[in-house]
Image (tube, rainbow, N blue to C red):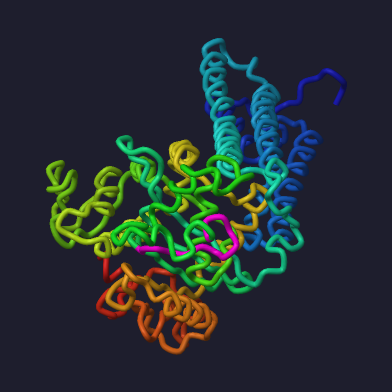
Amino acid sequence: MPPGKRPQFARPLTVGALIGWTALSAVLPGAAHLRSGHRRTGYILLTIFGALLLSALVGWFVLGGTENAGFVARDGILTTAVVLAVVGAIAWFLLVLFSYISLGPDRLSGRGQIVSGVAVGVLCVSVMAPFALTASTVMTGKQTANAIFESAASNPTAVPVKHEDPWGGRKRVNFLLVGGDGAGNREGVRTDSMTMASVHVATGNTAMFSLPRNLQHVRFPPGTALGKRFPDGFMRELPNGGLLNEVWQYAEDHPELMPGVKNGQRGPRALMDAIGYTLNLKIDYYALVNMFGFAHLVDAIGGLRIRVERDVPWGGLYGTAGTIKAGYRKLSGEEALWYGRSRVGSDDFSRMARQRCVIGAFAQQATPSVVLTNFAKIANVAKKMAKTDIPRELLEHIIDLGLKVKDAKIVSLQFVPPQFYTGSPDWQKIRTATARALRRSLQPARRPLAATASPGASGATPAATPTASRPTAAKPSQTPTQNGEAESLDELCGF
């Protein structure tokens, strides 16, 4: 073809055909150029597009699919993803524009040029939207992760994370999960929900230990400042005082007992020492979630569907603020919060059972599609409600470990009456039950019925066991009951 001569179409393009071929090029780059006779350019675009798809598939298999999903949480990977999304948006904008030009819109009538130009302009903006959304979502995720997780480089007391051995040779990693009560009418933070999760690194098998807020006179490791201050137990001189949920704030209010520890870190360190010594385990990391912020998190996913067994009044001493009626309900964030917190007409142990239902409902209903749909709102709430000492560099490994836990065996143990008296605990009994639960978490499943038990002479039983015909373990959806009957959260909470 002589230079400068326009390629001839097999037949003239209508307005609709021109718009259609341009739209097809947004999905299959090079299609419009092939149609317009620019075959060389069309084949080059198709080749580049195919190479990109092949690279993506190869990358997926090389990384092991979802097995190494934590890799994408690296700060550098997130930054690269944002840059690629921006480049992709510009590239697809130019692709659509030049595809349109290659089809010769100037051959149309004046009206046809206007109509096709407007349509292609809308298409150009449309093809950029997914890339812009991806860039915005990834950037939000990066900012949220960096806000919640402190880099080990900026924390002189943090242990450096080695990617080849992130857990430092440990077979188990122990996390303290805390629900903090930071109400506006109360100074400081009271830790009203405390659960220690011990995760077996190789398998993801987990033992969970729930400690009641009113566990009294816990002890601290000998030789520590708090251990010397309370050799007979936390505030042992107060028969009705010295509750476990007071340890965090006590340490924050007495900096002289923990010299060299920064403000805001004394509370979690003291609580980790107390609970770790109680269970005879070393707690590696903690994560605190503000319980009032949890209400906003529930609202961010559109509320929680849950079965309310009986009316739950809430607010004040007599439930004057309102009542959550019995039945299957969709609770707002405020209602879900108070359903788990209300003490009106019930005790702490009933409240702990309701809290498990709320947590279980959230875990079930916060599906990946729901999280992605509401990601920006969830991320903004998470930045305000979460606090942890897990290093930022460990986040990718936490994600990988979490995927193991998702389908692993879980045992659950609550230190509640009648098996465990919270007013004068038998510390050796607690340690013995803890050790037994850890051993059971690694034992092979023996029966198809998923089960847990309330803590007692028999310790804890598996929370999820696979049947012979289903090699995959059931989801960790079990909870111990006070009467010793094994019930799943599905049965107990009516999900």
Q: Is residue 388 left or right of residue 417?
A: right
State which quarter of the image contains the C terminus: bottom left
Where residue 327 appears, as percent x and y from the top left, is 16, 58
* 122 is higher (above) or lower (below) than 492: above
* 152 is higher (above) or lower (below) than 30: below
Query: Which image quadrant for residue 237?
Result: bottom left
In the foreground, 190 or 172: 190
In the foreground, 466 or 346: 346
* 280 is higher (above) or lower (below) than 148: below
Q: Is residue 318 left or right of residue 493?
A: left
In the foreground, 26 or 145: 145
* 29 is higher (above) or lower (below) than 346: above
In the rendered image, is residue 20 in sight?
Answer: no
State which quarter of the image contains the N terminus: top right
**Which residue is the extreme one toward the right?**
2
**Which residue is the extreme one toward the top?**
110
Where residue 156 appears, as percent x and y from the top left, is 71, 45
Q: Is residue 41 left or right of residue 140?
A: right
Query: Which image quadrant for residue 94?
Result: top right
Q: Main secondary structure of the magenta part?
A: loop
In the foreground, 351 or 281: 281
Residue at (67, 69) in percent of width and height: 170
Specify start and end residues of the magenta stretch as a single range: 215-227
Residue at (81, 19) in percent of width and height: 5
In the rendered image, is residue 302 in sight?
Answer: yes
Q: Is residue 55 left or right of residue 285?
A: right
Where residue 376 appears, as percent x and y from the top left, is 48, 37
Where residue 103 appears, as percent x and y from the top left, is 67, 25
**Which residue is the extreme one toward the front?**
237
Residue at (44, 70) in percent of width and height: 475
User: Is residue 324 located in the magenta-colored stretch of the structure?
Assistant: no
